[in-house]
Structures are given as structure tokens and as C-alpha cells.
Image (cartoon, helix red, strand yellow):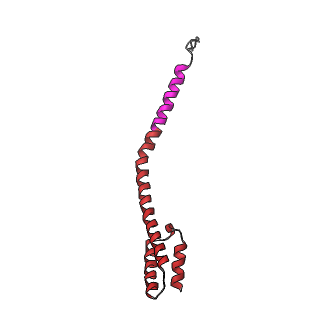
Amino acid sequence: MNILLSLTQTLCQSPWEISKDDLAEEYSALSYLTTEGFQLDWSGKKLDEVKEKKKKEKACLAQLQEMEKELQPLKRKYSEMEAQMDKVKAELSAAKSPVSLYDEDVV
């Protein structure tokens, strides 16, 4: 009964909390319980769902890492362009300012 309880508790966890080793142990426990005569088709399906979710999680994490890697140079370019725009805006502001009629070099 402890094995069945452990299996049920594992299935109640979020897939990201279940390690590959835990999943392998639960498949082993399920196999043992079914050979002992328990009808646990539902838990086998649930373990398969968890396995698929773990696979999807791994794929998504890899995809996110790749996207982050591709995004870094774009972020750097964005920052450089923003700094360049600030410089040009300052130059534009200076160019728009009226010409002074007073000569500041004369004392």
C-alpha cells in the first residue's frame, strides 16, 4: 500500500517537481503493482502525461535559452542605438536653439 500511496503522491506533484529518477521509480512501482494484480491503467496514463510534460518542459527551456542567446546581441545593439539617438537629439536641440546676438567672447 505504501508503494501505491507514493505513486499517488508523486502524481499529485507538479511535473517540474518530479525528477527523471522519480519518474523511473514510479514506472517501476507501477509495474510491480500491476504484476501484483492492481488495475492501475489510469496511473499509467497519468505517468505518461507527466513524462510528456517533462519532455515538453525540457524542449521549452532549451528553446528559451536559444532565444535568450539570440536576443543578447539585439539588446546590446538596441542600447547602442538608444545612446546614439540621445546624442543626435542633443545635437538637434543645440541646432534648434536661436543664435545669440550677444558675443560671449567679448568682455
Q: Residue at point 44% right, 58% down?
A: 60
Q: Position of residue 36 (x, y in %)?
A: 46, 88
Q: Position of residue 96 (x, y in %)?
A: 54, 20
Give the position of the C terminus as an image quadrant: top right
**Residue placed furthest toward the bottom:** 36
Span highlighted in magenta in the image: 80-96
Residue 94: within the magenta? yes
Name the dominant secondary structure of the magenta segment: helix
Q: Position of residue 103 (x, y in %)?
A: 56, 12
Q: Residue at point 52% right, 20% down?
A: 95
Residue 68: within the magenta? no
Q: Residue at point 45% right, 43% down?
A: 75
Q: Position of residue 98 (x, y in %)?
A: 57, 16
Front position in the image: 88 or 10? 10
Number of callouts in the render?
A: 0
Q: Is residue 22 above or below residue 68?
A: below
Q: Is residue 106 above or below residue 12?
A: above
Front position in the image: 58 or 105? 58
